[in-house]
Amino acid sequence: MAKRVTIHDVAAEAGVSRQTVTRAMNDRDDIKEATRLRVLEAVERLGYRPSRFARNLVTRRKQHALGLVVSSFDNPYYTSIAAEMLTAAAERGWQLIMAAEQDDTAAVLGMLASQADVVALHFGGTGTELDELAGGLPVVRLEAESTLPGVHSVALDIESGIEAVVAELRARGARRFGMVDSAHSLEAHGARAVPGVYGPSPKRRWYERAVGDQLAGVTIGDESIVDGRRAFGELLERHPDVDAVLMFNDLMALGAVQYAQSHGISVPDRVRIVGIDGLALGEAVHPRLTSIALDVRGIASHTMDIAELVAKADFARLAPIHRKSGSSILWRESA
């Protein structure tokens, strides 16, 4: 895929600064006509499409927009993030533009470049990849701290939640731990999962560290109720002594509860089940689902804090901002 042309490319082509490019394209009268023509000719040659962020640097528009990119709206966890972002954006007078990645980050970011001032998304690739995809658009990486130059982030502290739930499960009598991990770990494979290739997720690594030699086994599955049900059954068949199971997310955990019900397995007496997300859907099953609840409201609030700072500052000179949101345990009957 060809690299999308950015304002930096135009500046280099015309031999001017980035600020001069934005002034020329906004027909400002504080640059020479010859310089303006040189910039516009470079724009035409390169086929540059200016981002909303670049335009706002000059026009100082007061109406800002945040672009939110999620993996899929099929998972209610992402719809809960979208709902909190919508509320946080409205409270601060920002517009929110939402999109689902659907395996094509480049197309989504290309669309948002002309509509959003800042974009928030999940991303596990390299700095070069993100620079090519975002094309100079300010980026906030969600749920993991960014180590990429110029990229802001709002991380999630899931590790302490996993440590806390393992300690409490031990106190309640659990001795043999199992896990159902996602078959599509973004962190293991870079910008997106590689079909047919599995790599342990960070959640699995944290869980294995917490349970130590009490780990009985791990199976993997797609992030859905149906495959959570299948993978949970496979785990119990392979390791019948397992008495506590952490599921990668709440959807998969709902499938585990379904499997236990249909096979006459007592929960939590025979096996304790814990999910990760804190979805309200956990209240809709019997027994109700215990979950490591993620602070999505905190994610939204921190993201908007960063977006407002970016909008007020010279983005090129703003040092990366990193925030962290926490997690807590929703103890219900399944554990």
Image (cartoon, rainbow, N blue to C red):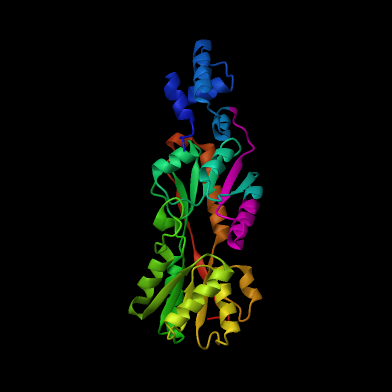
Q: Using the rendered view, name the quadrant where residue 296 is placed.
A: bottom right
Magenta region, residue range: 59-88
In the image, residue 297 lies at what x, y percent?
Answer: 58, 59
Compared to residue 322, the image places residue 180 above or below, namely: below
Q: Residue furthest front?
A: 196
| 75 inside magenta stretch | yes
Of residue 184 and residue 57, the one placed in the foreground of this image is 184
Of residue 17 and residue 15, the one placed in the foreground of this image is 15
Determine the residue positioned at 49% across, 34% down: 4
Determine the residue positioned at 58% across, 39% down: 111
| 263 inside magenta stretch | no
Compared to residue 149, the image places residue 13 above or below, namely: above
Q: Using the rendered view, name the quadrant where residue 79 is placed.
A: bottom right
Compared to residue 159, the image places residue 124 above or below, namely: above
In the image, residue 73 lies at what x, y percent?
Answer: 61, 56
Of residue 327 and residue 127, the one placed in the foreground of this image is 127
Determine the residue positioned at 42% across, 82% down: 239
Question: How many numbered discs?
Answer: 0
